[in-house]
Amino acid sequence: MSRSDIKSLQLERLKRLVKYCYDNVPFYHKKLNMAGVLPEKIKTLSDIQYIPYTNKTDLRDNYPFGLFATPMKNIARIHASSGTTGKPTVVGYTKNDLENWAEMVARITTAAGASDETIVQIAFGYGMFTGALGLHYGLEKIGATVVPTSSGNTEKQLMFMRDFKTNALVATPSYALYMAECAKELGYPMSDYHLKLGILGSEGCTPEMRDQIEAAWGIFVTDNYGLSEICGPGMSGECHLRQGLHINEDHFICETIDPNTLEVLPSGSEGELVVTTLTKEAIPLLRYRTKDLTRITEEKCECGRTTARMDKIKGRSDDMLKIRGVNVFPSQVESALVGMDKIGPHYQLIVRREGFADTLEVKVELIDGSVLEKYSELEGITRSIKSRLRTILGLDAKVTLAEPKSLERFQGKAKRVLDLRNEK
């Protein structure tokens, strides 16, 4: 579609959505009335700026079904977040929502290189998490053969990979890397594995980490993006050129805003991603603040797709660490560490408060544990890491070298930051 046709479709669906929310969700009826935004006020796409934002607190305050726009008899499935920081966020899907979701995932996995020739192993945890079932139904829709192994039991996962000749993997980047580590330890030649494509997600993956995974498995890795609140995986994904994640714009309007002033930023500016779900029936969301930082461009991709693209997520506005006045994102540390000589790709950031200042310790694993007995070599590695971090972060961090395999491995989302600032 041309850009003008995409925007015309978005406006048509935005008008319908605002009226749908106003008529069917008491929360939005009240919020839109308070903001003076009646459905008839939406006449152009730019009028979206008058609609108030929705955030995760709104979902939690209306737990479990307060934001649903349709009776429970029309709800075909319910998913929920883990709720590790409070009440989980609960989302629902009508049958039409599920069909749209599968279509969106089908698009992004096709763009990544999947087809009806693909035998894909899904190593996401199945359950209330949206990732596994979201990818599952989208890949089945394009005719791929799905192997729903779920996460964990890595040795059996690798056996299935060898025996089933799995040629694609769905997993978190950290688990894909861990699986490669285990594959080498088991001693089977890498030629026994047939992986060609990695459709990775659920956590950030820097280009440096991606290079490590590709080198370890000999595969082509693509990134995709989604949130359980807006549908799950499928909002956007990379094509084979990997020049940004193509957004399914017939289903979503994406904006970037300044997370401090809440001002809408022009196209091409980095800011917090805000998403409006244009076609969701069960739990439609108006201008949902994701807290994820990215940049959106409307330039046509060389692959031929005309949808807007978003950059890989830089980090979360609420995950940013402020160390001695310097803004630090975990992804920056990962970019600095991955690929350095003599250290592995697994790391941990430890934040403490000493006096009135926050400090950062970066703990990394050595590849060769015998180096721990060679003081001068340890000093050299430590200096090298400190110098690299200073160049990229603009501050000095404490560096601790750990024994091989001493840091925790993750089968789901990796937890890289240990915040000890509130501990005595």
Image (cartoon, rainbow, N blue to C red):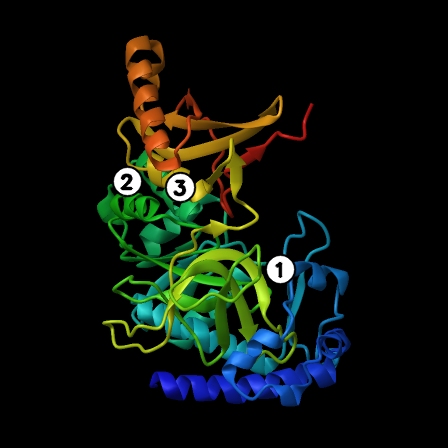
Which is in the foreground here, disc 3 or disc 2? 3
Looking at the image, which is closer to me, 95 or 385? 385
- Location of residue 29 in the rendering, given as x and y in whole percent from the top left corner: 75, 79
Q: What residue type is labelled 1?
A: Met
Are the residues at dot 1 and dot 3 in contact (C-beta closer than 8 Å)?
Answer: no
Residue 350 shows in this picture: yes
| Residue behind mark 1 | 128
Pinpoint residue 151: horizontal percent, then vertical percent: 50, 50
Is residue 351 depicted above or below 128 in this figure? above
For residue 188, which numbered disc appears in the image?
Answer: 2
Quarter location, residue 105: bottom left
Chain-order first, disc 3 or disc 2:
2
| Residue 34 located left or right of residue 7 | right
Q: The C terminus lies in which quarter of the figure? A: top right
Q: What residue type is labelled 2?
A: Tyr
The residue wearing badge 3 is 332
Q: Quadrant of the N terminus?
A: bottom left
